[in-house]
Amino acid sequence: MTRKIAIFDTTLRDGEQSPGASMNTEEKLVIARQLVRMNVDVIEAGFPISSPGDFKSVSEIGRIAGGACTVCGLTRAVDKDIEVAAEALKTAGRPRIHTGLGVSPSHLRDKLHLTEEQAIERAVHAVSYARKFVDDVEFYAEDAGRSDQEFLVRIVQAAVRAGATVVNIPDTTGYNMPWNFGTRIADLRERVDGIEDVTISVHTHNDLGMATALALDAVMNGATQIECTINGLGERAGNTSLEEVVMAIKMHGEALDAHTDVVTRELARASKLVSSITGINVQPNKAIVGANAFAHSSGIHQDGVLKARDTYEIIDPADVGAAGSEIILSARSGHAALRHRLGELGYTFADEDFDDVYNRFLEIADQKREVFDEDLEAMVQERQRDVKAVYTLDALQVSCGDPLVPTATATITDEVGATHVVCATGSGPVDAAYKAIDKVVAVHGDLSEFNDTFPMSRKLLSSDNLFCRSIISCNRRTFTSSGTSSVKCFAA
């Protein structure tokens, strides 16, 4: 059996310190319920003395968590902080007070104005005092990543003897290289008496982009708790990403001699929930939960994934609650990807015809960053039309916004080869486009139904001649004309 690694989620405390990520109590409770569903081991619910709102959040989260997980409140090594945290945690079935102070030379000298001996004395008092209220006390040695290792050993030893059940070794500034940080953890395990009876926790930051690597190297060297956040939220460049360390441990459990009890199928839902509440979107290429995490655009990759998913995906999207692998059609897509997607839409082509279809697809793809299903529908329908064009739509430009008036400018070649550039306004971009076309065609069209899976904003962002064709050919729309049927006779 591998070692159990406790997942300590600090989204509601350190994650909230991301600029713009402040949450009210109700929002925190929504996230806390999701964390309970995910089966995290510890929820750091807030810093109770910092505000009445944080006090209430810690208290309410303790109530809803019950005995499902530990609920933790942060304090400074100050008696009043500890007393307030203890009061807020009375509702929790499994309360923990998280107390400590800075231990690096700059923290001792510039922030706390303490000698090393004074810092040890304060740490011992804080841990001992917290133990008067709860049985579970975590001591944090802030900025341990830049501390003198000899002093770090001394202050951690003092905290363990004072009754700390967890010792937190943070790389608060994300300064360390992973192997150096791992060496610190190994040294503490070897030199601190009694440390085998307490949990060694690590709290790493992403200032150099290595928070996950720092945490995993610490696990390799004996740490048994990782402090992390959903989506890697946190101060500056953020904290260790919960979804990254959990999935890394799941993928490499034997090598790390580690496992977690997190329900990984809840990861994607948790990510979307936190993004929705905080308004901080995840970058598309974010590991595990980014929009592109299971998306494939290269033709070589698409061909491989269609033959066997694990040729390019080490994680099954279902394992993290993602919708599934996604084939992104673009100019880099190959025959296999296009044939696969057309087949899903219900279209099949003989081998001798498919090269022409693919070449037409590439023409469209060269004009756009991504080819959507409705583009493929228009392409197929265009191929199936056998009427002779009376008018050719050479260009269509649509402008709209708030407070702009929707305006369309169309360039149309008529049956005798004359070019017409016309402009019209309308109640919306499609209405404006039809009115502009009517000026040349002289046949009034009524748009009786408009049903589109994609928001118009997405259409406009990727507008090109294909979008124009989808309007003129009335793809997936019902169009009735009060005049002749020549309005249907447009060349693509």
Image (spheres, rainbow, N blue to C red):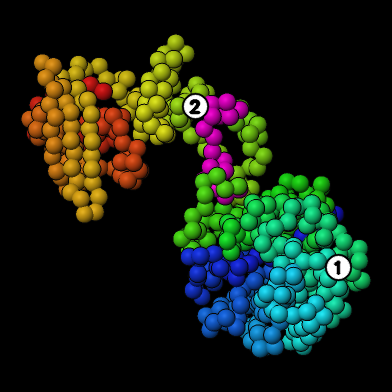
At horizontal 89% and vertical 69% (from top left) the residue drawn is 192
Q: Is residue 261 left or right of residue 435?
A: right
| Chain part drawn in magenta | 288-304
Name the quarter where the N terminus is drawn: bottom right
Percent of width and height locating residue 252:
76, 46
Question: Is 438 drawn above or below residue 21 in the view shown?
Answer: above
Residue kind at label 2, given as amino acid type: Ser
Give the image quarter of residue 218: bottom right
Q: Residue 290 colored magenta?
A: yes
At horizontal 91% and vertical 63% (from top left) the residue drawn is 190
Q: Nearer the viewer, mark 2 or mark 1?
A: 1
Give the image quarter of residue 16: bottom right
Q: Which residue is mark 1?
A: 150
In the rendered picture of this protein, how many numbered marks are placed on residues? 2
Residue kind at label 1, given as amino acid type: Glu
Percent of width and height locating residue 436:
14, 35
Give the image quarter of residue 237: bottom right
Mark 2 nearby-residue class (10 Å; few <14, some 14–19, many ≥20): many
Q: Is residue 153 visible?
A: yes
Q: Is residue 97 visible?
A: no
Question: Is 225 drawn above or below residue 466 in the view shown?
Answer: below
Percent of width and height locating residue 47:
61, 77
Percent of width and height locating residue 483:
8, 30
Residue 455 or residue 385, whichever sits in front: 455
Q: Which residue is mark 2?
A: 333
Callout 1: helix, strand or loop?
helix
Going from the N terminus, do you reach mark 2 or mark 1 first?
A: 1
Residue 26 or residue 66, whichever sits in front: 26
Q: Residue 72 colored magenta?
A: no
